[in-house]
């Protein structure tokens, strides 16, 4: 009985520490003493951002289906990385040149995408981007102001018209500071003028 109690107290002491290697060794040792194998296998998991999207493949497939069926392939791109899934929308499908007001066509694009995004609980980060050509406008004194306004108007539409909860949505403006292509050609600058809807990993 004394031996059993001693074994119990030692195991309880080992459990109070987070060193799983010592705990495993202790349990296995007393398993041998008490005639039981007592072997414990520890499983070490490696980080995998895909586990944050329980249905990441189906989410990607649903978004891709919306893009393909509506002919958005030239203007809407999908990127999946450690942050989550980014829906990158070129500015000319959402806004007129130098403007931040959403038009009827742009609202239709966001509506189609929101039908998928609304079905998941993940937070959204709306990011505005521009090229490096200085803006000449009485409304926006810099590209940064324009990028923030576009991101804000996109986010506000998603919250008010597409019923995305406000607590899930944040906004940031990057201006020309995070290009995805060189700004040395019209094609490159066009790729950099975009709004990204980032579906963040949980």
Image (cartoon, rainbow, N blue to C red):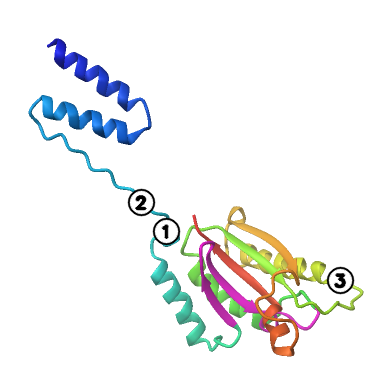
Displayed quadrant of residue 123: bottom right
Q: Are marks 1 and 2 in contact (CB under 8 Å)?
A: yes
Q: Are marks 1 and 3 in contact (CB under 8 Å)?
A: no
What's the CA distance linking mark 1 and mark 3?
41 Å
Look at the numbered disc 1 and give the secondary structure of its residue: loop
Q: Residue at x 69, y 85 (%)?
A: 188
Look at the numbered disc 2 and give the secondary structure of its residue: loop
How many residues crowd around disc 2 within 10 Å: few (fewer than 14), some, or many (20 or more)?
Answer: few
Quadrant placement of the N terminus: top left
Q: Is residue 85 magenta?
A: yes
Q: Is residue 112 above or below residue 41?
A: below
How many numbered discs, if any?
A: 3
- Outermost residue toward the right? 138
| 1 or 3: mark nearer the eye | 1
Q: Is residue 13 above or below residue 191?
A: above
| Image x and y of residue 122, in percent | 51, 58
What's the CA distance linking mark 1 and mark 2?
9 Å
Look at the numbered disc 3 and give the secondary structure of its residue: loop
| Image x and y of residue 81, in percent | 51, 67
| Image x and y of residue 64, in percent | 47, 79
Lower position in the chain sequence, tag 3 or tag 2 = 2
Residue bearing the label numbered 3:
140
Q: Residue at x 31, y 36 (%)?
A: 21
Displayed quadrant of residue 155: bottom right
Residue bearing the label numbered 2:
45
Task: Name the disc covering residue 48, or none.
Answer: 1
Q: Is residue 15 magenta?
A: no
| Image x and y of residue 67, in percent | 51, 82
Q: Residue at x 62, y 56 (%)?
A: 166
How many residues crowd around disc 1 within 10 Å: few (fewer than 14), some, or many (20 or more)?
Answer: few
Q: Which residues are magenta?
A: 76-98
């Amino acid at each position: 009985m004394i031996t059993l109690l001693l074994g119990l107290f030692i195991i309880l002491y080992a459990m109070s520490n987070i060193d799983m290697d010592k705990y495993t060794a202790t349990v296995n040792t007393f398993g041998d003493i008490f005639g039981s194998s007592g072997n414990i296998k520890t499983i070490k998991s490696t980080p995998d951002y895909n586990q944050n999207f329980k249905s990441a493949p189906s989410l990607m497939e649903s978004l891709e289906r919306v893009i393909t069926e509506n002919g958005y392939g030239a203007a809407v791109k999908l990127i999946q990385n450690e942050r989550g899934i980014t829906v990158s929308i070129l500015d000319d499908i959402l806004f007129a040149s130098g403007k931040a007001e959403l038009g009827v066509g742009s609202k239709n694009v966001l509506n189609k995408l929101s039908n998928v995004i609304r079905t998941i609980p993940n937070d959204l980060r709306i990011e505005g981007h521009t090229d490096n050509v200085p803006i000449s406008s009485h409304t926006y004194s810099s590209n940064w102001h324009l990028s923030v306004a576009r991101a804000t108007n996109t986010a506000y539409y998603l919250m008010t018209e597409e019923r995305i909860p406000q607590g899930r949505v944040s906004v940031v403006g990057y201006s020309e500071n995070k290009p995805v292509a060189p700004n040395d050609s019209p094609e490159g600058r066009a790729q950099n003028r975009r709004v990204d809807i980032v579906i963040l990993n949980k």
